[in-house]
Image (cartoon, helix red, strand yellow):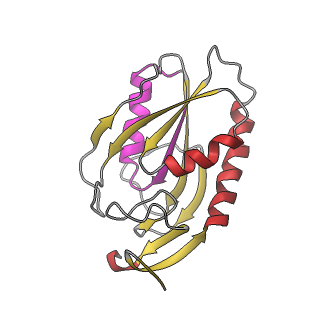
Amino acid sequence: MTPTHLGPAEHLFSAEEVEAAIQRMAVAINKDLEHLTPRRPVVLLCVLTGAVVVVGQLMPHLHFPLVLDCVQVSRYGAETSGGSLQWRTRPKESLAGAVVLLVDDILDEGITLQALQEYCVAEGAAAIHTAVMVRKKRPRTVEVQVDYVGLEVPDHFVFGYGLDARGLGRNAPGIFVLLEDN
């Protein structure tokens, strides 16, 4: 058990382990996307706020032209259980005809990621590639395709490295399980 400002937590992955996982994802993404010669750069779509750390770590390792954009949706807010999907920010870049690399912090139930994939399709994306830093080992509410996964975690509330618990803990050095909510 590790004490944190959020209460007792179990340290699952160190910052070095998370960074190594992000680098492994970059290798796989480059293998799939660097040979593309799209009419325009890949749209790297960061799902705010959780994926900002992952995207910041991932971008220097990607070897193809890209344009950074973001979308902000949330099901959690300051809670530790998901509610209805709230759209806060939509991408500024046109997705029509674009190859999109959608990057999120976590795949939990799959509802948010599925809605974002459907949004990209509706906006006319030519192809959608999806990456998540963390995938929970759990049954999904919906079927959702994820192309690149950094780490697998147990079905508990996790925080750190961009992931939050009640709005806090995004800056924790690694990934932790919040013990009081499990």
Q: Nearer the viewer, residue 20 or 111?
A: 20
How many marks on residues? 0
The span shown in magenta is 101-125
User: In the displayed image of the protein, which residue is found farthest to the top?
Assistant: 39
Q: Which residue occupies 46% across, 53% down?
A: 107
Q: In this view, does 98 lie to the left or right of 119?
A: right
**Does residue 74 lie above or below 174 as drawn?**
above
Quadrant the C terminus occupies:
bottom left
The part of the image, by quadrant, that contains residue 42 is: top right
Which residue is depicted at the point 41% across and 48% down?
A: 49
- Provide residue 23's location: percent of width, then percent of height: 70, 51
User: In the visual, does 13 lie left or right of 37?
Assistant: left
Quadrant of the rendered image containing residue 82:
bottom left
Question: In screen coordinates, is 121 left or right of 36?
Answer: left
Q: Which quarter of the figure has residue 9?
A: bottom left
Residue appearing at x 50%, y 47% in the figure: 52
Toward the bottom, the furthest residue is 1
Residue 130 x/y as whole percent: 54, 40
Percent position of residue 86, x then y:
26, 42
Q: Does the magenta stretch include residue 161?
A: no
